[in-house]
Image: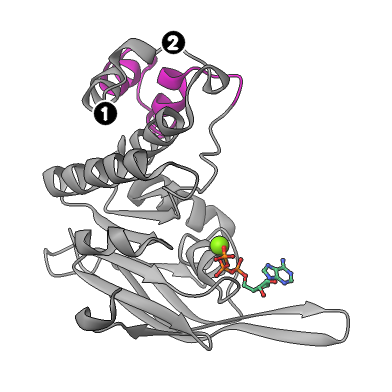
Amino acid sequence: MSELTPVLTAQGVAKRFCQSEAQIAVLNGVELTLSAGERVAIVGRSGSGKSTLLHVLAGLDDADAGSVTVVGETMTPASSEVRTGLRRRHMGFVYQQHHLLSEFTALENVAMPLRLNGLSQPEAEQRSAALLTRVGLARRLHHLPSELSGGERQRVAVARALIHAPSVVLADEPTGNLDSASARELMSLMVDLSESVAVGFLVVTHDPSMLDHFDRVLTLVDGKLLELPREERN
Ligand SMILES: Nc1ncnc2c1ncn2[C@@H]1O[C@H](COP(=O)(O)OP(=O)(O)OP(=O)(O)O)[C@@H](O)[C@H]1O
Ligand SMILES: [Mg+2]
């Protein structure tokens, strides 16, 4: 990959859902290019297809048409093995509801992507402890998700998404369940981390006060992504 290779692209991505007789075209020709280290927000009304888009970009869901590339490699169309491999090596994903594994400690949750990439347990845990310390959780390493606050769980989820130094992180309303102070803190943390490791961030958010953190803001309308001019951000 050259420095100029986008970390994520989408071309002509379409996705529709069939509900009884009706067909709902949720994505209808999505075009996107995310550069290395770029931070892009996606806004759009509820039901406009933001989560569907993130799932298709992450290869967690199929597209009906179009293509997606990750660091220049084809994510869609591709087999589920190829997609899993690309996601494991190059992507992090932060869900709205953290999706941490409830039986595992904070440390074990963060170490998981490294273990899946073949690192030994001591090395994976050492790196995970260092990142958890960076996100302010040095004294919470051995807590289960149920023993953490909402904001702490989201910080663990962010650490888990970043631990394997991915090229791109997709986040679906990562601050959606937090009070405004915790949301601001988490977003600043993501910005700091994205700057220090030059990861491309694509973040769905409903919160206009977050948008200053982003290089570009896109809106999903009628199944297409449009650039939102700076003056229309609030
Ligand atoms: N598995 C499915 N089967 C049928 N319809 C679906 C399915 N998943 C999503 N949809 C529909 O697709 C549309 C887009 O859903 P999506 O979850 O992507 O919206 P969203 O923009 O993320 O909304 P929100 O802001 O509320 O999270 C919705 O109208 C939803 O009802
Ligand atoms: Mg959604």
Q: Residue at x 48, y 21 (%)?
A: 148
State the residue position of label 2. Answer: 142
Q: Residue 5, how many percent across, how many down? A: 19, 69
| Residue range (magenta) | 102-128
Q: Residue at x 17, y 58 (%)?
A: 37
Q: Residue 87, how many percent across, how many down? A: 43, 51
- Residue that protrudes farthest toward the right in the picture: 20
Residue 107 appears in which quarter of the rendering? Answer: top left
State the residue position of label 1. Answer: 135
Q: Residue 60, how many percent across, how many down? A: 56, 58
Q: Is residue 116 visible?
A: no
Picture layout, residue 64 above or below residue 204: below
Q: Residues within 10 Å of mark 2 (few under 14, many from 20)?
A: some
Please give left or right for residue 19 compared with residue 152 in the image: right
Please give left or right for residue 47 compared with residue 195 in the image: right
Q: Which structural element holds mark 1?
A: loop
The answer as to whether callout 1 falls within 8 Å of ligand 2 is no
Q: Which structural element holds mark 2?
A: loop
Picture layout, residue 142 above or below residue 157: above
Q: Residue 55, how many percent across, how many down? A: 53, 62
Amino acid, disc 2: His
Q: Residue at x 23, y 20 (%)?
A: 130
Q: Residue at x 30, y 73 (%)?
A: 234
Q: 193 or 59, which is in the foreground?
A: 193
